[in-house]
Amino acid sequence: MKADDFFATPIEFLKGVGPLRADSLRKELGIFTFGDLLFHFPFRYVDRTRFYTTREIVADMPYVQLKGRITKLTVKGEHRRKHLSGIFQDEAGTIELKWFQGLRWVTQSVKLHTDYVLFGKPSSYNGIINVIHPELEPVSEAYKEQASALQPVYPSTEKLKAKGLDSKGILRLQKQLQLQLSPVLKETLPQETLQQFRLMGRRPSLTQIHFPDTADSLKSAEARLKFEELFYIQLRLLSQKLLRTEKFKGMNFSVVGEKFTAFFNDKLPFPLTNAQKRVIREIRQDCGSGRQMNRLLQGDV
């Protein structure tokens, strides 16, 4: 498969997607093709090598990772207030877990008194620490799926989460996409540019941005992808400038009248700075060139 064909392949043809998930990805995240998914980058990374205990958790922490067991699950409330409450216990103590959606799935899939790795955002309600809609994985499975100590976190929505496409679900799709990426991806920057700025290659950068081996490799991948984006923006601007100056002619003001010079010499109550004089000369040259002028004149007022 050619690179262009790969990037343009509709997302429903990726293993694990299908028509229903593809429709949700298009509507919720604007992901239509393999290329769209590949450039759906994580918005942050979390260190999955760090484990906390329940005693260390406070409500303002950005996220926590625990290892322990769920000892109790209870359905509380009625109708719209119905939710599922659980008790998660480790060797240091307990915290409360809460689910407001997918209650049936949680009660059917979560096993009591089984070792789990829990990941989520802690909060506090009535002075009690809890984690709402935590990620839970059996300890044995958690280490199998962990491709990197720095785990990516992807943007998602509630509708996607209902279809199993939360951050972890999108991560699984990214893994599947990487399996098909290697033989088709080509370099887009000249080798001289890569060497001059010590940039990572395109293929490894699009792997490391999703599955970083280390913090340094992630930094290098981000630098490469940012450089490429800005590089092509600059090329596009230069191309547009060249097209504008060569194809579209402007008014030619070849002669500067006496009133123009007299205004600056006699009417202004202050002398112009050297920088101001230089800018005026450049504008006068542009006005006499016969090309369209496109300038932003900026200064102190």
Image (cartoon, rainbow, N blue to C red):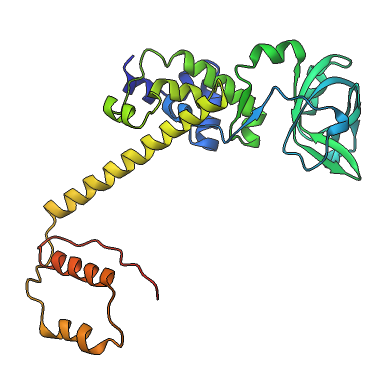
Residue 168 x/y as whole percent? 63, 24
Residue 101, image quadrant: top right
Residue 44 spot, x, y in % from top left: 60, 34
| Front residue of this view, candidates 59 and 213 | 213
Q: Is residue 92 above or below residue 43?
A: above
Q: Residue at x 62, y 36 (%)?
A: 157
Q: Quadrant of residue 42?
A: top right
- Height in image: 116 above or below 274? above
Please state which of residues 130 and 61 is positioned toward the viewer in this rendering.
Answer: 61
- How many marks can you see? 0
Q: Quadrant of the C terminus?
A: bottom left
Q: Residue at coordinates 32% horizontally, 23% vertically from top-left? A: 187
Residue in view at x 71 percent, y 12 percent: 141
Q: Is residue 172 left or right of residue 177?
A: right
Is residue 17 among what the camera can see? no
Which percent across, then down, holds residue 182? 41, 14
Position of 13 relative to 134 (above/below): above
Tell me which corner region of the image, top left, top right, bottom left or bottom right, holds residue 299: bottom left
Q: Is residue 141 above or below residue 123?
A: above
Looking at this view, is 116 or 296 the one in front? 296
